[in-house]
């Protein structure tokens, strides 16, 4: 929540965000479809990150169910929009290295698949699986936060080593200095990189990762972003699966709730009407505890109702 609130100022795309982005990135975002992509991404992911926090507040889930549902539908739409915007800028995001592009694509695929599974399972009243997929989706989506300290630490390490380079086009380097106020003759690009003095030059320049200039800082962040993203996704995926494996009692409780609601709704295979583990692998068929079935049947007889499977 704090990370999200601190970055709502980035909705000022051409102001605050332009001045805060990694040196060199604004060259690619300033116009064209990537400008549309960054607006779409930030305009969706920031409200999404704010709203999703309330989905995990117990009092809202139990006492304000309509609000929980409306919030959920908005979150689904924002997730799709956010991922679409992210994919539009992926080619040059944080330097656009193949590892970075692959990491961002995998993150978009995981979160799109996860939110779809969460939606399907709640429509099938499979609440235990809805919980699991919501946790997977947004904890893994949160890996973008963990990426930040990893990449900053990584940049510090490789800067001190003094032997890492990243390639940048002359136009990007020149624009980076202009972004920080070095316009016209005061722009040192041609002095630092004589290859860029030729107006027709469109080649890539090997930029040393350093603190000597904005392009050196940007080069370091670009090199370490992909590494940080993959490491963060691994850590988040590991710990969310660890958490799910350590809370079987809560999963069983919610599956029993799912069983009761699915029976009331007339679903076949109550307790397993959604995407459950036995449909994916060789797990044995889940059976509700005998006392739960007896309690449910007694309650149905007491109120004089009953429903058949469909």
Image (cartoon, grey):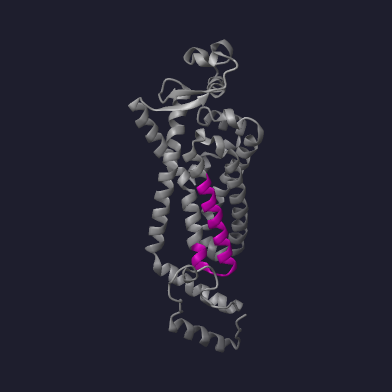
Residue farthest to the left?
A: 161
Q: Identify which residue is drawn at 39% across, 49% down.
A: 235
Q: Residue 53 versus residue 237: which sits nearer the camera? A: 237
Q: Is residue 249 visible?
A: yes
The residue lying toward the viewer, choosing from 135 and 274, is 274
Q: Quadrant of the C terminus?
A: bottom right
Along the line of sight, the residue nearer the viewer: 227 or 232: 227
Question: Does 194 sit above or below residue 56?
Answer: above
Give x and y (percent) for residue 237: 42, 53
Residue 144 percent across, percent down from the top left: 47, 44
Residue 213: % across, % down: 45, 21
Q: Position of residue 145 (x, y in %)?
A: 46, 43
Q: Is residue 188 visible?
A: no
Q: Residue at x 53, y 85 (%)?
A: 299
The reply to whether the magenta stretch includes residue 120 is yes
- In this rendering, would 40 be left or right of 130? right
- The structure residue drawn at horizontal position 51% and vertical position 62%, both measured from the top left corner, is 59
Looking at the rendered structure, the number of numbered marks drawn on it comes to 0
Q: Is residue 98 above or below residue 75?
A: above
Which quadrant would residue 309 be assigned to in this image?
bottom right
Magenta segment boundaries in residue numbering: 105-131
Q: Is residue 249 above or below residue 146?
A: below
- Please tell me whether the stretch drawn in magenta is mainly helix, strand or loop: helix
Specify whether 290 is left or right of 54. left
Q: Is residue 174 magenta?
A: no
Q: Residue at x 47, y 56 (%)?
A: 136
């Amino acid at each position: 929540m704090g990370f999200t609130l601190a970055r709502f100022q980035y909705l000022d795309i051409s102001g605050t965000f332009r001045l805060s982005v990694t040196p060199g990135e604004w060259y690619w975002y300033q116009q064209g479809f990537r400008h549309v992509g960054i607006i779409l991404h930030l305009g969706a992911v920031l409200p999404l990150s704010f709203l999703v926090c309330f989905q995990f507040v117990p009092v809202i889930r139990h006492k304000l169910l309509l609000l929980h549902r409306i919030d959920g539908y908005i979150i689904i739409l924002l997730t799709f929009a956010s991922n679409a915007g992210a994919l539009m800028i992926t080619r040059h995001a944080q330097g656009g290295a193949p590892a970075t592009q692959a990491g961002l694509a995998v993150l978009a695929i995981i979160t799109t698949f996860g939110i779809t599974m969460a939606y399907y399972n709640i429509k099938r009243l499979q609440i235990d699986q809805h919980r699991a997929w919501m946790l997977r989706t947004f904890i893994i989506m949160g890996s973008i936060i963990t990426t930040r300290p990893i990449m900053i630490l990584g940049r510090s390490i490789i800067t001190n080593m003094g032997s890492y380079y990243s390639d940048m086009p002359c136009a990007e380097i020149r624009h980076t200095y202009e972004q920080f106020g070095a316009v016209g003759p005061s722009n040192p690009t041609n002095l630092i990189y004589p290859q860029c003095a030729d107006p027709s030059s469109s080649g890539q320049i090997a930029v040393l990762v350093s603190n000597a200039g904005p392009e050196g800082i940007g080069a370091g962040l670009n090199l370490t972003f992909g590494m940080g993203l993959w490491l963060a996704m691994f850590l988040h995926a590991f710990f969310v699966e660890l958490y799910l494996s350590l809370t079987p009692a809560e999963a069983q409780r919610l599956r029993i709730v799912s069983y009761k609601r699915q029976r009331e709704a007339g679903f076949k295979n109550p307790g397993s009407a959604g995407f459950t583990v036995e449909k994916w692998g060789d797990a044995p068929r889940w059976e509700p505890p005998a006392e739960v079935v007896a309690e449910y049947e007694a309650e149905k007889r007491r109120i004089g109702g009953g429903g058949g499977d469909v």
